[in-house]
Amino acid sequence: MTNLKSNFTIAALVAVSLMWTSCKKEVSNQSPEEPTTEINQSRLGGITPDDPILVSKIPLVMSTNTNVNGRFSSELFSAKGKPTGGGGGGSTTDNTPPAVTIMSPANGSTVSGLVTVSVAASDNVGVSSVSFSVNGVVKSTLTVSPYNFYWDASTVTDGTHTLTATAKDAKGNTGSYSITVAKNTIVTPPPSGTPPSSYFLQTPPVGNQGYEWTCVPFATTYAARSIEQYYRTNASGFDLATNIFSPEYVYNQTKIASDCGSGTAITLTLDLMKNKGVLPWSAMPYSDLNGCTLLPTSAQDQTAAAYKIGGYSKIINTDKNAIKLMIAAKHPVIASLTIDNNFQNAGPGYIWKTAGIGNIGHALIICGYDDAKNAYKVMNSWGTAWGDAGYLWIDYDFFPTRAGYYVYVMNY
């Protein structure tokens, strides 16, 4: 398989610095790669987990009808060898899980103090118990209705928290339902209106992270921050000196270890741009061949401060409406993914909708969507010889199965 790393040069990027690339572009004159079941790990990876305490405090953008789990737990558990309590030894198998809903508080609401969590549950043979969990930890279980739980919200940190009700019937079948609530954390709706059926952002030329594990700063800095600057300034194109930003500046200050094969976290890079800003590419050009120890001078930090972001918010990965509305409002969405060989070997026109072999952490941006394809369009950082000239489609319904629980957007 062709190594896509070695074809990246600074000169090549400078040559196209005055051009812009549309996320609309779908036709590539590059030949697709030969299929393989192996992952070339030298060009993958680079993302590390975000601090869950920090993530819980990030403002949440959420549509009112968001499915919090994305994959509701309606798992079936067999009560093998256990008496049903009905007597008579009937052999009929019941595989129907109980129906369960959290009636209050409302999904996305703000809570404080003592909170009453009201749960409604029903089943074809009867509900035997309902359990209440906070962030995956069971707090209480009731065996008779009404299923009202009392939760002291002062016992958790400020931020967003997941409340889950799990109902079990006499056969051992379970059904679960979850909501997200916030304590002293902002929850806002996405931009108003109905998103168009398709929308595509203008992007800088597709970059190539090379041999360094820099997928996160290429997503947050080179792609997302540059696109934000392009639209905020009503620019007519992308330029290395004004609105294409340096992943070198961000990566060298946020990588989790000293070597260039260590990654960084999405929130670390966003926090750096919030607190210090970021340099234009021309002020600190990126190279995967010059090491990753170069740190900015005080003068460069002063320049970077002019490009700070106001903050950032998170969106649950199943909130398709919010994601689409953000893109239509000209805000790229930053996502972490678990990728496989189907992703790596993607070619022009390919829609990623089935899992393959491999589990590698990666980061990129959603730069468009098309309801006719039922898919998001993403921009990668492996150069234009990969995918569809550097882009890829990901099926709406498949996306939550491969994405981190939250995706991120810069505040506006």
Image (spheres, rainbow, N blue to C red):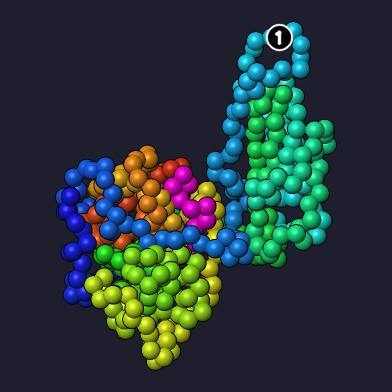
Q: Is residue 408 magenta?
A: yes
Residue of label 1: 89
Locate residue 214: give its quadrant.
bottom left
Q: Is residue 25 magenta?
A: no
Q: Is residue 252 above or below residue 106?
A: below
Position in image of residue 103 (x %, y %): 74, 43
Pointer 1: residues within 10 angstroms few (<14), some, or many (20+)? few
Position in image of residue 165 (x %, y %): 70, 41
Question: Left or right: where does residue 308 sit relative to residue 15?
Answer: right
Q: Is residue 323 visible to the viewer in this orientation of the structure?
A: yes
Question: Left or right: where does residue 141 sit relative to residue 33?
Answer: right
Position in image of residue 178 (x %, y %): 65, 45
Locate residue 192: give its quadrant.
bottom right
Residue located farthest toward the top when viewing the structure as drawn = 88
Q: Which residues are magenta?
A: 400-409
Instruction: Tell me the amino acid under the disc marked 1.
Output: Gly
Q: Is residue 179 visible to the viewer in this orientation of the structure?
A: no
